[in-house]
Structures are given as structure tokens and as C-alpha cells.
Image: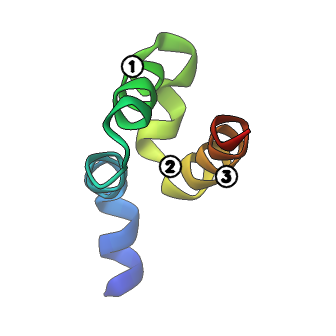
Amino acid sequence: MVDVMFEREQKKLVNYLVGSLAPLNFKKEIQRRVDQEQNKNYKSNVIEFCRWLTELLATFMM
């Protein structure tokens, strides 16, 4: 059951993760990038989104 819900609710999970980001300027930048056409696949795949986000966070922290 959990696996089925995980598969069906990927977009919601990504939205929750983006909504929980801080600081605000990082959150806005991630939201802007997720909305770009070339990054649309991250909206429906939470695992790929997390990998991508980790890379961006490392760059942001420098």
C-alpha cells in the first residue's frame, strides 16, 4: 500500500519538499528551476528531485 501511494503521490511529495526549503531565496530559486521546462521531470520523480536538489544545495552553500 505504501509503495502504491508513493508512486501515485510523487508530485505532492516534491511540492512538500520545495515548500519546506529555507532560506527563502533558495526556496524561490528551486521553485523557479522546477517550473522550467527542462526540469519538469523532477516534479514527478521525488528520488531524482532529491538528487538534483542535493547538487544545487552544494553549489548554493559555496
Q: Which mark is residue 32?
A: 1
Mark 2, other Cα within 10 Å: few <14 / some 14–19 / many ≥20 = some
Q: Position of residue 21 (x, y in %)?
A: 36, 50
Type of amino acid at the residue the image marks with label 2: Asn
> Which residue bears the numbered disc 3?
51
Q: Position of residue 4 (x, y in %)?
A: 35, 75
Q: Confirm or deny contact between disc 3 and disc 2 (CB under 8 A).
A: no
The picture quadrant where one finds residue 29 is top left
> Which residue bears the numbered disc 2?
45
Q: Secondary structure at mark 1?
A: helix
Question: CA gap, disc 3 to disc 2?
Answer: 10 Å
Q: Nearer the viewer, residue 11 or 55?
A: 55
**Vertical order, 32 against 8 (above or below):** above
Identify the mark nearer the N-term, 3 or 1: 1
Type of amino acid at the residue the image marks with label 1: Arg
Query: Can you say which quadrant of the picture contains the C terminus?
Result: top right
Q: Secondary structure at mark 3?
A: helix
The picture quadrant where one finds residue 25 is top left
Q: Position of residue 45 (x, y in %)?
A: 50, 49
**Vertical order, 60 against 51 (above or below):** above
Which residue is at a point 65% across and 51% down the rendered structure image?
A: 54
Q: Of circles 3 and 2, which is in front?
A: 3
Type of amino acid at the residue the image marks with label 3: Arg
